[in-house]
Image (cartoon, rainbow, N blue to C red):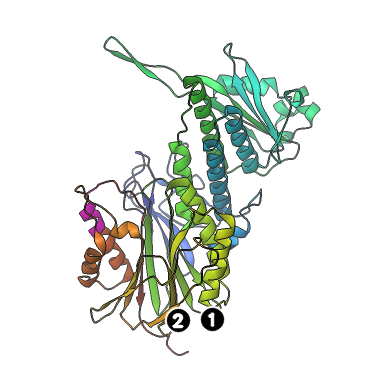
Amino acid sequence: MPFRIGRQADCDLVLRDGRISRQHAQITQENGKFFVEDLGSRHGTFVNEKKITRQELHPEDTIGFGFANSFQIIFAGEEKRIEDLLERVDSPAPSSASSRELYHLGVLLEAAGAIYGHMLLEDMLAAVVDAAIRVTGADRGVLMLASESGELQPTVARESGQRTLQHSEVHVSSSVLKQVAETRRELIVADIGEERTLREQASIVGEALRTLLAIPLERQPTIRSVDSTVVASRPGLLGVLYLDSRRPLTAFSELDRQVLRSLAAEAATVVENARLFAEGRERERLERELEIASDIQQQLLPKAFPKDPHLVAAGRTIACRAVGGDCYDFVDLPDGSRGFVVADVAGKGMPAALLASMLMGSFCATASGSLPLSELAKRVNHRVCDRTDEASYATLFYAIIHPNGAMEYFNAGHVPAFLCRRSGEIVALEAQNLPIGMFDFAEFTTATAQIEPGDFLVMYSDGVTEAVNPDGIMFGEDRLREVLKSFSGSDAQQLLDKVLAAVRAFTAGYAQADDITVVTLQYFGPKPAA
């Protein structure tokens, strides 16, 4: 199926920009090659800044939409497995687009947790500077705040390794600060040796600097009314986030810049709240930061499941907040079988998203071997228990589908998966175990079933059955069973769409309190003999 890009809500990638067409472009795969095709958009589709109608994609190609300040998509080629990404999550300079996204997601969520966990302004700002150093690989970072007279003064100075610097150790180029303050534009130079105007400055030469970054922190514009006239004030400069290094760093991608802008916006919000609310500072989530985290988290989910001759699958997660605790994935096994997992982390928002990322990484890395299912569950359970508190746990359903239709599975406190027989019978695969991460001593039992040609397997999170309508009535398991019984389509994607459409119609747009995840599998029969 084509991967559709546009402003319309049912696109595979929704870009929230009014200048982008509802159905702007699509990416297709033909004979192992990927192509991007414009869908008659109003302002055109561009590859490497050249307008195209249809063009083959190559790794590192940049897809644009006709505006310098709009979205850009970097085509990374074949996707990396999530376990490979997780092995490199702590690397300061990830090499692939997917691993950079995972790394930046972790930095953003950890920074947010540190910021929201402190009440002292200096601690909050130190968390922002530390995150910016990790994202860029810089040697040090300084947060300069504007005094009442407008002079920029160092407030927090840190170096890599989260060590605090004394203000006397900080020497920042005054001309760079003046340029950023006057233009209100970021200055990012990956190699100062290529910038003549900078490499000749005494302060830069004296520090032997090779990389320099400066991001303005702006106060949000305010609106006030004067008689019957609404007056908007120009945003004021709160300060500058400054970073430098004695090493030339790699070129900074648009994702790097987005994260830095988000961190700068976070710092600006913290400073503004501190000034506005001297007693009891509010700790707000930044919508921009959450949107970036949400985009990255969505990109970590499978874009599509592999299509085997005997098995196809489809899946989707709808978070009730910008980031959520529902997740799903698949695992390729050494014997040619394939495993499918759906998990639901207790809680909402950033804490749940952090645990979900850790859980999926640990699970997929462990499940990719040849462990018995009961031992797999025990190992993942021990790992989650060792790294979380008692209140952190997750329900999980995992099934291995063999080419001959034999299925092994375990249900760790999760809602029952449904095996929908071609005959119309619906078999509930109930929970036999405690949730993952609840008790370190827990033992796990497994079960088996046989999937016949034409059968479907439906895995989901409790956000489906606990979805409520405006009257407060839950969707419930009985309604889900009726949807499955009435299904007359022919493939897994149609069944997925039918379930989500039924939930959407029932809730009638009412805001939900839990994430919704559905994964459907369709079995065709054993692999034909070679």
Q: Secondary structure at mark 2?
A: loop
List x then y, in percent, for residue 234.
44, 18
Is 508 one of the magenta-colored residues? yes
Which secondary structure class fits the magenta region best?
A: helix
The circle drawn on residue 254 is: none
Q: Between marks 1 and 2, how big is the CA–CA gap?
A: 9 Å
List x then y, in percent, for residue 41.
34, 46
Q: Nearer the viewer, residue 455 or 414?
A: 414
The circle drawn on residue 402 is: 2
List x then y, in percent, for residue 192.
71, 34
Residue furthest out toward the bottom: 529
- Amino acid of disc 1: Asp
- Amino acid of disc 2: His
Q: Is the residue marked by circle 1 packed among few (<14), some (14-19), or many (20+) residues within 10 Å?
A: few
Q: Can the viewer see residue 286? A: yes
Name above or below for residue 155 compared with residue 385: above
Q: Are marks 1 and 2 in contact (CB under 8 Å)?
A: yes
Name above or below for residue 166 compared with residue 252: above
Where does the magenta region start and end?
502-510
Q: Can the viewer see residue 1? A: no
